[in-house]
């Protein structure tokens, strides 16, 4: 069974049909640059351009870097155009895709469900938290494999600041921090999240997950196990497709 997955990110909009049994892309993915400003209209055109590369006529799961309720409505837009707030993204994107059924999901939640099924969180019970370090910090919170959506732990307060402004990988780049310096900030952040949730496992996602050897050795004093994400670049696409499949089932449309 295949569902189309699209990942809307700060630099690119990427998508491909996803093989849900394998948890992998069924075809090579296509990417277009994210328009700037990333308004709803311009991004919707980008999503259409990606999906148009394939002869696709089924459901589409799409990630968004903000709070998404009901698989549809955007509630926050910390790092994208504020015009998204309160947009019915399902209606907008479905219309732009010629009426295909659309499910919209928070980007970190999508990456999380993919990692829990096919990656670093496979078969892990208890409390598991995936954190994506990129332009912002995204989070996905799981209890015995069940997602608690829209946890938004990137916006916890850390030393009087929005945590993602201090500890995202963009914060590292903007302030030209060494890996060690940045790792100390990440450690403080993880300690704060651990104090609140006492997870068994932290999964570190986002682009930096590929470079975990450069910063994980500097992190200590955290009781939970800390591992890098495994699906890396495709976790969002795969997870978006998985959510769309789940929604189809819940809505009675079948798989
Ligand atoms: C947003 C989250 C998103 C994260 C990563 C944060 O600023 O509030 O919803 O998951 O960035 O894109």
Image: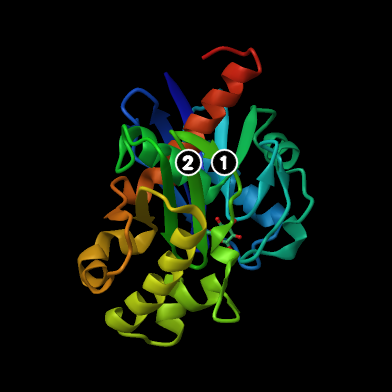
Q: Secondary structure at mark 2?
A: strand
The x, y position of residue 15, in whole percent, is: 46, 42
Marks 2 and 1, the one that precedes in the sequence: 2
Residue 216 visible in the displayed image: yes
Q: Within 8 Å: ligand 1 and the Cβ of disc 1?
A: no
The x, y position of residue 20, in whole percent, is: 39, 25
Q: Residue at x 68, y 40 (%)?
A: 93
Q: Residues within 10 Å of mark 2 (few under 14, many from 20)?
A: many
Residues marked 2 and 1 touching at CB (< 8 Å):
yes
**Total numbered circles:** 2
In the image, is 184 to the left or to the right of 175? left
Residue 148, label in figure: 1
Q: Is residue 40 above or below residue 98?
A: below
Quadrant holding ligand 1?
bottom right
Q: Is residue 141 above or below residue 102?
A: below
The x, y position of residue 229, in whole percent, is: 32, 50
Q: Quadrant of the N terminus?
A: top left
The x, y position of residue 239, in whole percent, is: 46, 38
Q: Residues within 10 Å of mark 1 (few under 14, many from 20)?
A: few
In the image, is 200 to the left or to the right of 143? left
Q: Secondary structure at mark 1?
A: strand
Closer to the camera in the image, 53 or 209: 209
In the image, is 83 to the left or to the right of 114? right
Residue 168, label in figure: none
In the image, is 218 to the left or to the right of 136? left
Q: Which residue is mark 2?
A: 142
Q: Is residue 64 above or below residue 92?
A: below
Closer to the camera in the image, 172 or 186: 186
């Amino acid at each position: 069974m295949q569902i189309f997955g699209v990942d809307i990110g700060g630099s690119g909009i990427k998508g491909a049909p996803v093989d849900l049994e394998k948890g992998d892309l069924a075809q090579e993915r296509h990417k277009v640059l994210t328009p700037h400003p990333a308004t709803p209209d311009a991004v919707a055109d980008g999503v259409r351009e990606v999906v148009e590369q394939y002869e696709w006529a089924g459901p589409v799961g799409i990630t968004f870097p903000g709070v998404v309720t009901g698989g549809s409505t955007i509630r926050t837009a910390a790092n994208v155009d504020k015009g998204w707030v309160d947009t019915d993204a399902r209606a907008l994107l479905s219309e732009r895709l010629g009426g295909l059924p659309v499910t919209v999901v928070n980007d970190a939640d999508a990456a999380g469900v993919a990692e829990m099924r096919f990656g670093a969180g496979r078969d892990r019970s208890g409390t598991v938290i995936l954190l994506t370090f990129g332009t912002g910090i995204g989070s996905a919170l799981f209890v015995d494999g069940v997602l608690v959506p829209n946890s938004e732990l990137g916006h916890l307060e850390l030393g009087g600041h929005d945590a993602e402004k201090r500890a995202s990988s963009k914060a590292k780049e903007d302030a030209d921090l060494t890996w060690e310096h940045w790792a100390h900030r990440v450690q403080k952040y993880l300690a704060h999240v651990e104090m609140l949730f006492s997870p068994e496992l932290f999964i570190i996602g986002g682009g930096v997950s590929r470079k975990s050897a450069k910063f994980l050795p500097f992190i200590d004093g955290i009781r939970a196990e800390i591992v890098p994400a495994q699906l890396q670049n495709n976790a969002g696409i795969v997870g978006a497709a998985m959510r769309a499949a789940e929604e189809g089932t819940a809505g009675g449309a079948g798989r």
